Amino acid sequence: MRKDLFDRRAVLAGTTALGAAGMLRGPALAQTAAPPAVSLPTRGDYVVRGAHVLSMDESLGDFPTGDVHVRNGEIAGIGLSVNAPGAEVIDGKGMICMPGFVDTHWHHWTTFLRPLMRQDDPSLTYFPVTAKYGVLYTPQDSYRSVRLGLAQALAAGITTTQNWAHNVRSPAHADAEMSAMRDTGIRGRFAYGNPVRDPNDKPMDIADLARAKRDWVTKGGMLTLAICSRSVDGANSVTRGGITTEMAKKEWGAARELGLPITLHTSGTGGIKILDDAGLLGPDVQLVHPLGTTEEDRATLAKHKTSYSTSPVGEARRPGVTQLAEMLSAGVNMSLSIDHSTTFDADMFKNMGTLFSLNMHRLGDKFKLTTRRLVQLATIDGALDLGLGNQTGSLTPGKRADLILIRTTAPNMAPIGDPYDALVQLAQPSNIELVVVDGRILRRGGQYTGLDYEAVVGDATDAVTALKVRAG
């Protein structure tokens, strides 16, 4: 079994510090350098031929039978017939070729806590379990849990994710999570947050935020950075934290000085007004879970160009209504997200289908929500929400090559009519034949090409077993 590729001294230092207090940032951890990158598949020169191409670029449109040429990690050409001499040919017949899905909010650090949770036992659901065990995480735990979540992301056709890391217990934990993102080859944004159960009056580690930007973010690179803020609505959530507007102004101001965007959960009604009254809203802010907003709230969001990420499968289990129709009608920018993959799975097809069903159930024909619009939310709109619209989200020549092939000949799909309807109503992650990120083929024929999945699962299982022992 392949061992984790980061400094063992950092793991030991993190374990010692966490054993004492569960939330210390020791100097040994702060000095930990990021581990070396693992070897990923090379970027090739290949052309997908004869697929039903959904470009998600309105200027290009779709091609019922078309080609997509990938060279040096870039979309080199797209059309009815692309000339690509010398390129490897990938047969796209019977498949949909489209951009990879873009997830805009996912707590990857919680992934390996699955065996500790039960949805039908209130004491073992997501919030109490993550609050109990999150304080005991070592950097190695963070690495292994995030890597497990990212492996699931790739299997689900998600080529870009926002890792909503609201349990960064030390600089070494931050490095561990970003290392996991790098080592799986996924594109993403790392949203740096406070540790679980940190005191609400304890400020974010801005110095390490600046260090993370300096060490990890490069122009045009695979990783960007944001902060995930604690709630700013008077709430005192155990796992999210709740801070005053004064604290938010300091932390958000520091993030903005670094040129970093902000993302945060909203908790019930009233939060948007608090943010607006404090002068905190702007186009660099993404809110999560559109539940309980008023018409005035939505007008405020549209005015400030503040976006919203919706996680429909998880939100369907909460009180309130996912207000997609209201948000879109008000002109609020929207995107789709997984949230977490502990008590439900990572499935963008299911997310799109759930949104379609919820809209039909609530509004019927009062709001026309097309299946193409839903696919747009899961691709280009997500890329725009994360500030990555110039890199990914559509099969536009010059953009980076993030794409998936979906086999339409499987029993759950064949024969298909409209491809967008098939994606929203019929498709499953098991239908995904090929996953490409930045020109690298990371999954092919249902198998990982650059990831030792057996080791990923084994390491996660070992880690959560040890975590249970430490928790008593």
Image: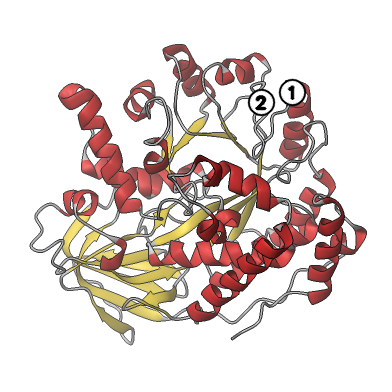
Residue occupying image coordinates x 59% and y 82%: 39
* 373 or 158, nearer to the observer: 158
Q: Where is residue 334 drawn, in percent x and y?
A: 42, 35
Q: Are marks 2 and 1 in contact (CB under 8 Å)?
A: yes
Rendered position, 21 above or below 290: below
* 82 or 420, nearer to the observer: 420
Viewport quadrant of the C terminus: bottom right
Mark 2 and mark 1: span between their CA atoms?
Answer: 6 Å
Give left or right: position of 169 versus 400: right
Q: Where is residue 218 drawn, in percent x and y?
A: 67, 60
Rendered position, 367 above or below 219: above
Query: Which label number is shown at residue 333?
Result: none
* 93 or 321, nearer to the observer: 321
Q: Residues within 10 Å of mark 2 (few under 14, many from 20)?
A: many
Q: Where is residue 156 drawn, in percent x and y?
A: 38, 62
Viewport quadrant of the N terminus: bottom right
Let me know if residue 444 appears in the view: yes
Residue occupying image coordinates x 43% and y 44%: 120
Residue occupying image coordinates x 73% and y 43%: 194
Numbered-mark total: 2
> Which residue matches tag 2?
232
Q: Residues within 10 Å of mark 1 (few under 14, many from 20)?
A: some
Dot 2 falls on a residue whose secondary structure is loop
> Which residue matches tag 1?
244
Dot 1 falls on a residue whose secondary structure is loop
Q: Amino acid at mark 2?
A: Val
Give left or right: position of 191 versus 455: right
Q: Where is residue 153 drawn, in percent x and y?
A: 45, 61
Q: Amino acid at mark 1?
A: Thr
Q: Earlier in the sequence, mark 2 or mark 1?
A: 2
